[in-house]
Image (cartoon, rainbow, N blue to C red):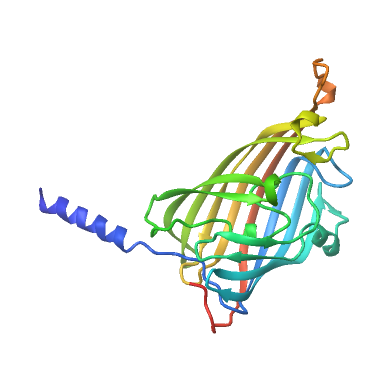
């Protein structure tokens, strides 16, 4: 074996050994602030414009505050601080109070690997799945990945499952993640992770258009596919999300279930095609260094 080859192998091994070990880190009293922009295009399932083709832009200011640090993780509160919506280029009449009725302040426990538990929120449902995000708990957006138990090395891949919603009716999505190494952004090096998901959709509604798990007595069925890509950058020392982008799509069709076996007509079907582009960027940090979850 040549000395050059030996040197290459040694260099590769050292690079693997010194790859960063990243964990989420939270300090009691710490508060993170994020600016978000989400653009939805297609058939918009929103009050006053349900099913209408168009563009809806949401501008959000979000916070995540660490209330307490315990052995099993940090208890965090998340919520909205500012909200505005623009529909087809014009202001849409949804204020902060109305937005918080759908996306309320909520709590969750986050362990150092990013696993969420004890999600408590409330509020209403949007009437559709926003890829990668449970509207009842913003922690799913600001803690968007679960890390593997082993140190990160360039090209490492892993999978994890997130549940959006509660109980047996929770919508579960499997995400495939890949560590892309360190990337410099505005003079600072961040860990870069890319996540992909493709999720089939099958849900049922009763005669009153309410969700049901009773397939035999359901009146309508919705089938389709939700897929997308999330690109995430994490601050290696601070242990929090720095920036995230998401590109996703939802394609689904709802149709009646004919008990008599007759054919479903085209006019009885409702199709939805929805595209999503979003960015989230960390803005400010106020930290108390007395106790840290790491």
Residue 174 x %, y %:
56, 45
159, above or below 284, in the image: above
Q: Is residue 4 left or right of residue 170?
A: left
Residue 290 x %, y %:
54, 84
Instruction: Identify which residue, 70 or 158, lies in the foreground.
Output: 70
Q: Is residue 237 left or right of residue 69?
A: left
Viewer can see residue 41: yes
Instruction: Identify which residue, 57 or 272, lies in the foreground.
Output: 272
Instruction: Identify which residue, 271 or 282, lies in the foreground.
Output: 271
Residue 113 x %, y %:
50, 62
Which residue is found at the position 59% from the left and 50% from the top?
162
Which residue is found at the position 73% from the left and 57% from the top?
136
Query: Which quadrant holds residue 17?
Result: bottom left
267, above or below 70, in the image: above
Residue 109 x %, y %:
61, 66
Which residue is found at the position 45% from the left and 56% from the top?
148
Q: Is residue 234 left or right of residue 210?
A: left
């Amino acid at each position: 074996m040549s000395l050059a080859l030996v040197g290459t192998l040694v260099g590769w091994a050292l690079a693997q050994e010194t790859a960063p070990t990243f964990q989420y880190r939270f300090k009691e009293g710490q508060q993170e602030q994020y600016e978000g922009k989400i653009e939805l295009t297609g058939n918009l399932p929103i009050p006053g414009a349900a099913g209408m083709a168009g563009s809806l832009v949401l501008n959000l200011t979000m916070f995540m505050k660490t209330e307490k640090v315990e052995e099993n993780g940090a208890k965090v509160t998340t919520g909205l601080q500012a909200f505005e919506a623009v529909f087809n280029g014009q202001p849409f009449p949804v204020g902060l109070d109305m937005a918080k009725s759908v996306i309320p302040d909520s709590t969750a426990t986050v362990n150092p690997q990013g696993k969420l538990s004890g999600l408590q929120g409330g509020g209403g449902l949007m009437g559709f799945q926003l890829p990668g995000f449970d509207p009842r708990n913003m922690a799913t957006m600001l803690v968007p990945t679960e890390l593997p138990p082993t140190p990160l090395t360039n090209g490492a891949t892993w999978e994890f499952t997130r549940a959006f919603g509660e109980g047996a009716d929770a919508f579960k999505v499997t995400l495939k993640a890949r560590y892309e190494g360190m990337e410099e952004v505005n003079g600072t090096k961040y860990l870069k992770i890319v996540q992909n998901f493709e999720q089939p959709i099958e849900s049922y509604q009763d005669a009153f258009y309410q969700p049901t798990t009773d397939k035999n007595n359901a009146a309508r069925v919705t089938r389709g596919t939700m897929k997308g890509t999330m690109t995430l950058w994490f601050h290696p020392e601070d242990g929090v999300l720095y920036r995230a982008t998401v590109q996703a799509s939802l394609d689904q069709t709802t149709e009646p279930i004919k008990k008599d076996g007759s054919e479903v007509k085209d006019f009885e079907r409702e199709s939805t095609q929805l595209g999503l582009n979003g960015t989230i960027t960390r803005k400010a940090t106020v930290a108390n260094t007395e106790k840290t979850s790491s």
